[in-house]
Amino acid sequence: MVAHLPFYDVRNMDPCTSDPSVGTFQAINPLLADLGGFTVRRFLPRRERRMVGPWCFLDAFGPIAFGPQKAMDVPPHPHIGLQTVSWVVEGEILHKDSLGLQALARPGTLNLMTAGGGIAHAEETPPENSGRLHGFQLWVALPDAHRNTEPAFDHHPSLPAVDLPGGRATVFVGELAGARSGTRMFSPIVGAELHGAAGACLHVPLAPDFEHALLPCEGHPELDGHTLTADTLYYLGTGRRELAIRSGPSAFRSLLIGGTPFGEAILMWWNFVARTSDEIREARDDWQAGRRFGEVRAYSGPRLDAPPLVARPVPPNPMS
Ligand code: MN
């Protein structure tokens, strides 16, 4: 005889399930890009997904081990209309900019550069290093009202962490679960590193008006029945109030990025985020002529030349 089971909401049978009514789950594979002998995995922008909130660019690199040579050496180059976020999971990156500032990004610290109307910087492996490198470079598009703001650079030596059921989160940008990073930001946004304990289920409260994406960097977490891998960005759409992420037998680590959908069409070319092709042409001309951006005096070696700007208009970067 079949026993009569009491009536349960099906969600209650597995406490590690996200809200099943929210189904957006888009797996995005990276392009490989060569930054002068240094290979990165580029997850944003991709044809199928240009932005996640104001996040418009996401490169991942490593984990790698290296010898006496510099693992990373990106000579001086300009930026406009964006903020760069350097997040290091392992190793060190030394930032030098045209404001005359220098700062070492290492695990647990944040280098945040606000390009505004124009800044130049270089990023390189410092002479004293651990011989390891694993990290992320992200860009945040500045909204129209702030994109010509004064350039600035902020180094944050420590960032808030918040304990969550099943693990914790370090919030490097914006706010998550009541923890605020206090970093200089211009639109509703979150950037955090999630840690799930081995064998646990990590519960992460989310702002439902944000769109979010996960980029795992360690372990084999599971979300909504999918096993997530470190070579994939998972776009999760808007409307989620919580993520429930199951660890495998080992702990996991993942980036979480999000924000309100950006709502402004942007143009991206080389290291510039703009609105019109004329702005991009002017920024390129200014860099090539040595105007506007200043010099990165602390860097020894030549700066990067801008690639040629083809005669046809820059293709629009559709809002996503
Ligand atoms: Mn840069």
Image: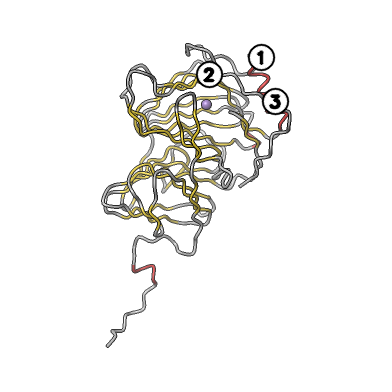
Location of residue 221 in the rendering, given as x and y in whole percent from the top left corner: 35, 51
SS for tag 2? strand
SS for tag 1? loop
Residue 29 as seen in the image, left or right of residue 218: right
Say which amino acid is labelled 2.
Pro
Q: CA distance from mark 2 to mark 1?
A: 14 Å
Residue identified by numbered label 1: 289
Residue at image position (54%, 17%) is 98
Query: Which label was assigned to residue 131?
Result: none
User: Could you classify mark 3 by the number of other residues whose Cα lies within 10 Å: few (under 14), some (14-19), or many (20 or more)?
Assistant: some
Q: Are marks 3 and 2 in contact (CB under 8 Å)?
A: no
Q: Spot the residue most to the bottom.
A: 1
Location of residue 300 in the rendering, given as x and y in whole percent from the top left corner: 47, 11
Residue identified by numbered label 2: 76
Q: Are marks 1 and 3 in contact (CB under 8 Å)?
A: no
Residue at image position (60%, 44%) is 262
Residue at image position (70%, 25%) is 281
Q: Is residue 17 above or below residue 172?
A: below
Frontmost residue, 251 versus 239: 251
Residue identified by numbered label 3: 281
SS for tag 3? helix
Say which amino acid is labelled 3.
Arg
Location of residue 19 in the rendering, given as x and y in whole percent from the top left corner: 44, 62
State which quarter of the image contains the N terminus: bottom left
Does mark 1 have its CB less than 8 Å from ligand 1?
A: no
Say which amino acid is labelled 1.
Ala
Q: CA distance from mark 1 to mark 3?
A: 12 Å
Frontmost residue, 316 versus 296: 316
Q: Are marks 2 and 1 in contact (CB under 8 Å)?
A: no
Which numbered disc flags the more N-terminal residue, 2 or 1? 2
Which numbered disc flags the more N-terminal residue, 1 or 3? 3
Q: Is residue 53 above or below residue 128?
A: below
